[in-house]
């Protein structure tokens, strides 16, 4: 989500006569991905202290409302399923048009409170943005809204001149170490395939108060795969690693629109991914630029992983197809789609 917002900030900053304001109001108000210098950044002057969560939440609500009133924006773009509820609640009865980008797994409950808030507050938004057609369809089974767009994420296109000569025998996965990403399944499947001279590289970090990295490392040790499995921790710029890898494996069971798959495809990597409810199926054409595997079908996943490992020609053909396929999600095309929708063009 942060990556997409930074990419959109760069695109919007190139537009003539556009003044860009970025309000950071969450618990962590740091900027990880670079943003244009022209963007005006706002942060509350108080720390969000979880010991006083209710008080801090109310303070943040009024901070956001008052800051928006001072800025007097022409358009407001909010990101994230929980955050969208907060923004719409903060700005109730103000006349600034708010567009919300919903980024959750489409059939996932946000909890009783947030499900109710979403049902109550989303109709007040000027427009809704979903990442996939599937997410839009699922939303419309329960709700209605007259102004909905389906716009994926902007994917940075990799320099196509730097690919095959850099490839190493690496299977790559990028994703936070949370249960729904199922890196443990990937470790077990890679160990069963046990390709000689190949390594599995896992990029990610513990998140959502889940401490999974040590468990994953212990699993690699127990399977006697320590020397073949590498944990990189949190990384910002992954382009070099994408270009060094030969296969991208993705075992997530819950997605909106996975940037990691898009970035792998832009780097001409064939992808093996579980076909979860939404996301991978609208990015990957099965058998053309990657493989879509029925959810949790480990035997099928292993078979396609082994097929790609053993067939360099197949990897190269699928990788080149992937790079062409993902051009529809280029920075400029997606940035323009967001810009036109939120400005009712």
Image: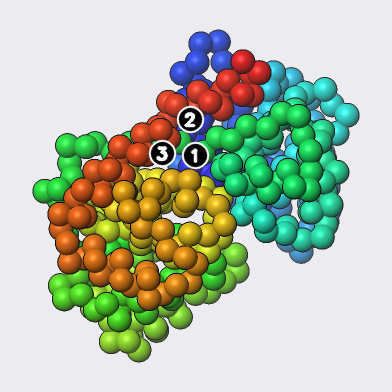
Q: Secondary structure at mark 3?
A: loop
Image check: 340 left or right of 285?
Answer: right
Residue 1 is situated, as x and y percent measured from the top left of the image, at 54, 45
**N-terminal of the two: label 2 or label 1?**
1
Q: Residue furthest left?
A: 165
Q: What is the quadrant of residue 342 in the picture?
A: top right
Q: Which mark is residue 153?
A: 1
Q: Which mark is residue 334?
A: 2
User: Is residue 95 positioned above or below 217 on the image?
Assistant: above
Image check: 17 left or right of 157?
Answer: right
- Are dots 1 and 3 in contact, CB under 8 Å? yes
Question: Closer to the camera, 290 or 45?
Answer: 290
How many angstroms separate mark 2 from mark 1 (CA)?
7 Å
Identity of the residue drawn at 74% across and 20% down: 72
For disc 3, the neighbor class at 10 Å (few under 14, some 14 to 19, many from 20) is many
Q: What is the quadrant of residue 61 in the picture?
A: top right
From where the camera sits, is residue 276 visible?
yes
For disc 2, the neighbor class at 10 Å (few under 14, some 14 to 19, many from 20) is many
- Are dots 2 and 1 in contact, CB under 8 Å? yes
Q: What is the quadrant of residue 77 in the picture?
A: top right
- Are dots 3 and 2 in contact, CB under 8 Å? yes
Residue 180 is situated, as x and y percent measured from the top left of the image, at 54, 67
Question: Closer to the camera, 284 or 119?
Answer: 284
**N-terminal of the two: label 3 or label 2?**
3
Q: Which mark is residue 155?
A: 3
User: How many numbered marks appear?
Assistant: 3
Q: Secondary structure at mark 1?
A: loop
């Amino acid at each position: 989500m942060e990556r997409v917002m930074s990419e959109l900030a760069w695109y919007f900053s190139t537009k003539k006569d556009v003044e860009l304001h970025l309000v950071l109001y969450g618990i962590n108000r740091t900027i990880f991905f670079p943003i244009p210098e022209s963007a005006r950044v706002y942060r509350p002057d108080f720390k969000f202290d979880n010991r006083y969560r209710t008080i801090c939440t109310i303070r943040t609500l009024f901070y956001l409302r008052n800051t928006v009133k001072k800025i007097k924006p022409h358009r407001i773009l909010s990101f994230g399923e929980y955050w969208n509820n907060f923004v719409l609640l903060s700005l109730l009865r103000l006349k600034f048009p708010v567009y919300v980008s919903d980024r959750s797994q489409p059939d996932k409950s946000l909890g009783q409170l947030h499900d109710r808030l979403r049902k109550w507050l989303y109709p007040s938004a000027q427009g809704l943005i979903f990442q996939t057609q599937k997410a839009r369809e699922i939303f419309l089974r329960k709700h209605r809204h007259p102004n909905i767009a389906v716009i994926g994420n902007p994917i940075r296109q990799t320099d196509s001149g730097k690919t095959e000569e850099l490839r190493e025998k690496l299977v790559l996965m990028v994703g936070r170490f949370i249960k729904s990403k199922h890196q443990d399944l990937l470790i077990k499947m890679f160990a069963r395939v046990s390709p000689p001279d190949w390594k599995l590289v896992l990029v990610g970090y513990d998140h959502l108060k889940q401490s999974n990295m040590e468990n994953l490392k212990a699993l690699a040790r127990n399977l006697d795969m320590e020397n073949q499995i590498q944990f990189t921790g949190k990384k910002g710029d992954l382009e070099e690693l994408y270009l060094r890898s030969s296969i991208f494996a993705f075992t997530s069971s819950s997605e909106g629109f996975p940037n990691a798959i898009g970035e792998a495809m832009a780097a001409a990597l064939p992808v093996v991914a579980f076909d979860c409810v939404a996301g991978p199926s609208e990015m990957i054409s099965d058998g053309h630029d990657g493989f879509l595997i029925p959810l949790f079908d480990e035997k099928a996943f292993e078979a396609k992983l082994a097929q790609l490992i053993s067939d360099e020609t197949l990897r190269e053909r699928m990788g080149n197809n992937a790079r062409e396929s993902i051009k529809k999600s280029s920075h400029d095309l997606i940035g323009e789609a967001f810009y036109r929708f939120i400005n009712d063009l």
